[in-house]
Amino acid sequence: MFKNLLEHFKKDLGVDLGTANTLVYVKGKGVVINEPSVVSINMRTEQILAVGNEAKEMLGKNPPHISTARPLTNGIISDFEATEKMLGYFIEKVNEGTFNFISRPRVIIGAPLDLTEVERKAVSDAALNAGASHVFIVEEPMAAAIGSRMPVQEPVGNFIVDIGGGTTEIAVISLSGIVKWKSIKIAGDEFNSNIIQYARDNFNLLVGERQAEEIKIRIGSAVEGIERMEYSMRGRDLLTGLPKEIMITDAQVREAIFKSLRTIVDNIKATLEVTPPELIADIHERGILLSGGGALLRGIDHLIAQATNIPVRIADDPLTAVVRGTGLLLDNQELLDEVAVYPVRDRRKN
């Protein structure tokens, strides 16, 4: 009876700890948090000033004594303390200020494919120190496939490409395991960098990361569309040092991100080339699934389909595929035991 009472108070969580955004799934409620993975710290007092949306508003606008940055780089923790505090903030927010030793949740975290054992331990320790009771780590493509309802437990080939903020994860999944995979550090953030560099090289214009991201979202595309699109790009003229505004077109944005897109396509083809023929037959029939924020880039499915001669579809709500997968695993302990890549970390053992 006491155990059932504890279960009533506990809110188990699924977390997509992404480079660009952190999403949190609460068992029985669904996705309740979707905020930028950004932390703002007062360097004089070492105090956390803001997390998530509020911290992102400070990016590029903060005075020298306030550091506003992303604690994760390419899906890997670059600032352990900031990551721990960010997770603690989100866990406390989920518990609406009622957090205590009784409500310590189980936490399932989606992580990149190529994390080392040390990096996985860092992710796990950050969650434990933030208030988790048990931590499970699941590879992001596996979580995305589960969240997209792919039959990962069946003896068939499932091909998924998860294009996030810091990494693109390519995986062939069968029988609850990843058969072949590639992980590259080219994804949404790299597209933003490409646009910033293009503006500098072609227009002598220095634009910020948020401006580049807005351009990517508004007019970014992987293939030529029916209508010509353009958007106002504002920044600092590198020649005069004064504010400047120009119009950039969708064709110019495609030119800016072309090399990054080509690298992703080449790695998809390279993964297909080493996939067992039995699974290739399944993939050719079932197609390729795209998930992650990068899947929302206009025409990226058509670009990949043209390059591979394989049907490509985009997951329903690709931004939340990973966190929805962790949420489904909260209700399926048997599958969780099969796909978790790191032994359960229990705070009582640390």
Image (spheres, rainbow, N blue to C red):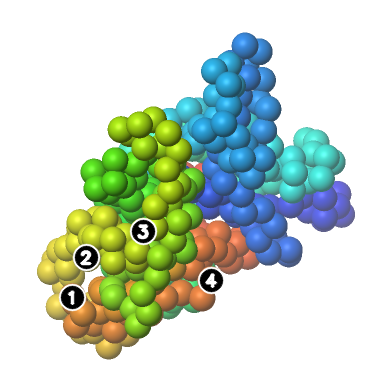
Alpha-carbon distance for marks 3 and 1?
27 Å
Q: Which mark is residue 265?
A: 2
Q: Which badge, 2 or 1, comes first in the chain's sequence? A: 2
Residue shown at 69% from the left, 42% from the top: 91
Q: Position of residue 116 (x, y in %)?
A: 33, 38
Alpha-carbon distance for marks 2 and 3?
25 Å
Residue occupied by mark 4: 317
Neighbor class of circle 4 (other Cα within 10 Å; few <14, some 14-19, many 20+) is: some
Q: Position of residue 94 (x, y in %)?
A: 74, 48
Q: Amino acid at mark 3?
A: Ile
Q: Position of residue 200 (x, y in %)?
A: 29, 42
Residue shown at 49% from the left, 36% from the top: 70
Which residue sits furthest top? Answer: 44
Quadrant holding the N terminus: bottom right
Vertically, is 348 above or below 271? above
Neighbor class of circle 1 (other Cα within 10 Å; few <14, some 14-19, many 20+) is: few
- Which label lies toward us, 3 or 1? 3
Residue occupied by mark 3: 248
Alpha-carbon distance for marks 4 and 1?
24 Å
Residue occupied by mark 1: 307
205, 17: nearer the viewer: 205
